[in-house]
Amino acid sequence: MFNPLSAEKIKGKLNSQRIGSEILVFDAVDSTNDLAKRYLEKDVAEGLVLIAESQTRGRGRRGRNWVSMPGIGLYLSIILKPEVQPRLLPQLTLLAGLATTL
């Protein structure tokens, strides 16, 4: 049975001072990435996590469509403001993917 996501429960399981400092959970969004861009325009703090139960216009790598049905997967974006060289930024996504599988 599908259990709705709870920002409080997720935050209680995190051992991080930065990522997850604020967590927002939505039933459905167009895209967590697009939502993150809109929040960045408001100059939100680093570490904001945006989670959606489903996405109506999710995107994968290279602009591919991303099917995001409720109760099937975890769809989220994290706002990071790293102080690294711009050429290294694409590697952050790869590292995040590896970290979640370990």
Image (spheres, rainbow, N blue to C red):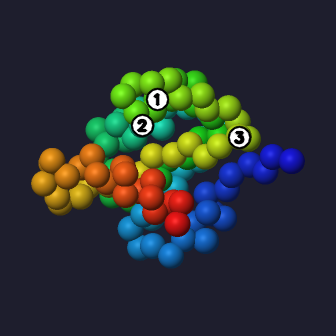
Relative to 90, say whether 65 is above or below.
above
Of residue 6 and residue 93, the one placed in the foreground of this image is 93
Which numbered disc covers residue 33?
2
Q: Residue at 61% x, 71% y: name it.
A: 12
How far across and how far down the image is residue 71, in percent?
A: 73, 41
How packed mark 3 is, by other alpha carbons closer than 10 Å (few <14, some 14-19, many 20 or more), is few
**In the rendered structure, are the residues bearing label 1 and label 2 in contact, judged by CB atoms less than 8 Å apart?**
yes
Using the rendered view, name the quadrant where residue 81 is placed: bottom left
Q: Is residue 35 visible?
A: no
Q: Secondary structure at mark 1?
A: loop
Distance from the alpha carbon under mark 3 to that under mark 2: 19 Å
Where does the image place residue 85, in percent across and percent down from the top left?
13, 54
Q: Amino acid at mark 3?
A: Ile
Could you tell me which residue is drawn at 52 percent across and 56 percent down?
Answer: 23
Toward the viewer: 13 or 25? 13
- For residue 10, side relative to residue 16 (left or right): right
Q: Position of residue 11 (x, y in %)?
A: 57, 66
Query: For the residue labelled by badge 3, is the local secondary structure a helix, a strand or a loop?
Result: loop
Quadrant in the picture for residue 60: top left
User: How many marks can you see?
Assistant: 3
Badge 2 element: helix
User: Is residue 11 in view?
Assistant: yes
**From the viewer's perspective, is 27 left or right of 30?**
right
- Res. 72 mark: 3
Mark 1 lies on residue: 59
Q: Amino acid at mark 1?
A: Arg
Which is more N-terminal, label 2 or label 1? 2
86 left or right, relative to 52: left
Residue at the location (27% across, 46% down)? 90
